[in-house]
Image (tube, rainbow, N blue to C red):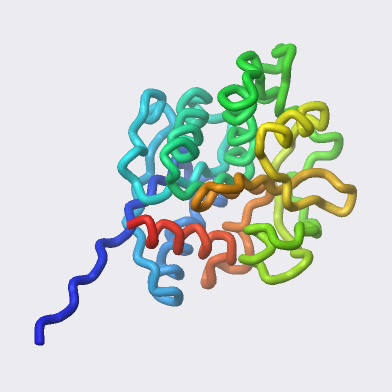
Amino acid sequence: MPNPVRNRPARVALVGDRSPHVRSHTRIPVLLDALRERDRLDLDAYWIPTEDVETGGVEGFDAVWLLPGSPYRSEAGAVAAVRTAREHKIPFLGTCAGFQHALLEYARTVCGLTEAGHAENDPDAEDQVVVPLACSLVGHEGTIRLTAGSLAGELLGTEQSLERFHCAYGPNPLHLDTLREHGLRFTGRDRDGEVRIAELPGHPFYLATLFQPELAGNGTRAHPLIRGWARAAAEHA
């Protein structure tokens, strides 16, 4: 009897300006091995610099992960990667700076805030959607409280989770209502009530976190949010 035809490995775009000095970048190969060996999720991963996706380039992938490492060499490329994944229903994960630029893309493209800015990229922008945090979260670890019934909550299987951060910028509270009114859902907050997770209902998989799930543990087991993204990539393939 002939062997059944196996699905091809999921092709995933790791968008970010790869550097040995960014801890999350050095962790990614270890996580890919863990997904393959422990979870039987074989991902064919391609690292793509931000400037290479300014005018497209991730449309044919099964998933997109906008990685930490800001300021990116190309803000336009980072935003374009998010927009393509959102509009083409490609599973999307954004962590740390990926979360920040997901909000930036949504504000500009969906909410009509065409002049929306990111304070790290343009500190003089008048309409900043991403602003400096009152207290830097570089090297910080904190508890995230999850919204019941959310994608993040279902993947984590708990009401709260201890997560690692490495960032100094976050969402501007003045724009959260506008983002929410246009469909973005905020499903994770820290103990002070500050937004730390964003999701997009109706999308196959759209999840952005200000924390860095790739830094959880020692890398031998992928974080549940990363496993969820990988499974969504496999399903897309």
Q: Position of residue 137 (x, y in %)?
A: 77, 45
Q: Is residue 146 visible?
A: yes
Depth check, front residue: 147 or 103: 147
- How many callouts does the rendering have? 0
Up/down of 63 relative to 117, above or below: below
Query: Residue 5, percent across and down?
Result: 18, 72
Q: Please tell me which residue is depicted at 38% across the width and 44% down the height of the picture.
A: 47
Left or right: 16 with respect to 138? left
- Residue sitting farthest toward the bottom: 1
Vertical order, 175 against 25 (above or below): above
User: Which quadrant would residue 145 be assigned to in this image?
Assistant: bottom right
Q: Position of residue 25 (x, y in %)?
A: 50, 49
From the viewer's perspective, is residue 214 above or below residue 134? below
Which quadrant holds the C terminus? bottom left
Residue drawn where x is 37% and y is 56% of the image: 236
218 left or right of 81 in image: right
In the rendered image of this protein, does residue 225 appear above or below residue 167? below
Task: Give me the residue at 79% from left, 40% from top.
Answer: 136
Estimate the x, y position of residue 53 in percent, counting from the top left: 39, 30
The answer to whether residue 169 of the structure is visible from this angle is no
The outermost residue toward the right is 192
Q: Quadrant of the N terminus?
A: bottom left
Residue at left offset 18%, top offset 77%: 4
The image quarter containing residue 44 is bottom left
